Image: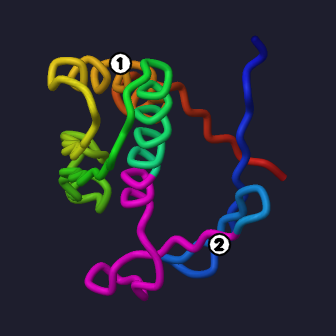
């Protein structure tokens, strides 16, 4: 099967604000006021957690359908821990990104707990965003004229 390519463009509006275009959608990115933003939109790492929630939603529900497991409700609470020192240039140690992400899944479905556990394990393996967070993905940043 041929690989799919997804595209996003972005235009900087200020030191903390970006207007991104994704297909026919405009998405605003900003920072909270306490770190210099105007708090008009989620920040980049919050969007990363939103992307994870959205991808897990599609993946969990898709696998449940494949397995004939009716889903009554699905909710998630996701927490990402991040030490800002490297990002802020205060330290060269550690990571600039999340040091840990915890996904709490609240899934009501007509299936034994063991089957739901198997479903979540498979979703963790098949979710593209989870895969990108767990495994190193090459990223190239190139200057264009």
Q: Is 48 situated above or below 134?
A: below
- Could you tell me which residue is drawn at 72 percent across and 63 percent down? 21
- Could you tell me which residue is drawn at 49 percent across and 39 percent down? 58
Labelled disc at residue 122: 1
Labelled disc at residue 57: none
Q: In which quadrant will I find the N terminus? A: top right
- Is 45 one of the magenta-colored residues? yes
Lateral position of residue 89 relative to residue 4, left or right: left
For the view shown, which residue lies furthest in the top direction?
1
Q: Considering depth in this image, is 43 or 62 the residue closer to the camera? A: 62
Q: Position of residue 133 (x, y in %)?
A: 38, 33
Q: Is 46 situated above or below 97?
A: below
Disc 2: which residue: 19
Element at label 1: helix
Q: Which of marks 2 and 1 is in front?
A: 1
Crowding around mark 1 (Cα neighbors within 10 Å: few <14, some 14 to 19, many 20+) is some
Q: Where is residue 38 in the image (x, y as percent from the top left)?
A: 43, 88
Q: Where is residue 71 in the image (x, y as percent from the top left)?
A: 36, 39
Distance from Cα at disc 2 to Cα at disc 1: 35 Å
Quarter location, residue 18: bottom right
Q: Considering depth in this image, is 12 or 109 the residue closer to the camera? A: 109
For the view shown, which residue lies furthest in the right direction?
145
- Could you tell me which residue is drawn at 37 percent across and 60 percent down? 46
User: Range of the magenta residues?
Assistant: 26-50
């Amino acid at each position: 099967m041929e690989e799919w390519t997804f595209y996003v463009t972005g235009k900087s509006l200020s030191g903390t604000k970006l207007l991104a275009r994704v297909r026919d959608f405009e998405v605003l990115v900003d920072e909270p006021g306490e770190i210099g933003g105007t708090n008009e939109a989620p920040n980049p790492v919050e969007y990363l957690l939103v992307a994870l929630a959205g991808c897990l939603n599609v993946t969990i529900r898709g696998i449940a359908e494949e397995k004939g497991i009716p889903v009554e409700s699905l909710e998630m609470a996701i927490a990402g821990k991040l030490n800002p020192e490297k990002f802020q240039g205060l330290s060269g140690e550690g990571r600039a990104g999340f040091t840990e992400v915890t996904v709490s899944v609240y899934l009501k479905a007509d299936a034994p707990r063991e089957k739901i556990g198997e479903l979540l394990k498979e979703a963790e393996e098949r979710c593209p965003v989870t895969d990108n967070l767990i495994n190193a993905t090459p990223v190239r940043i190139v200057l264009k004229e």
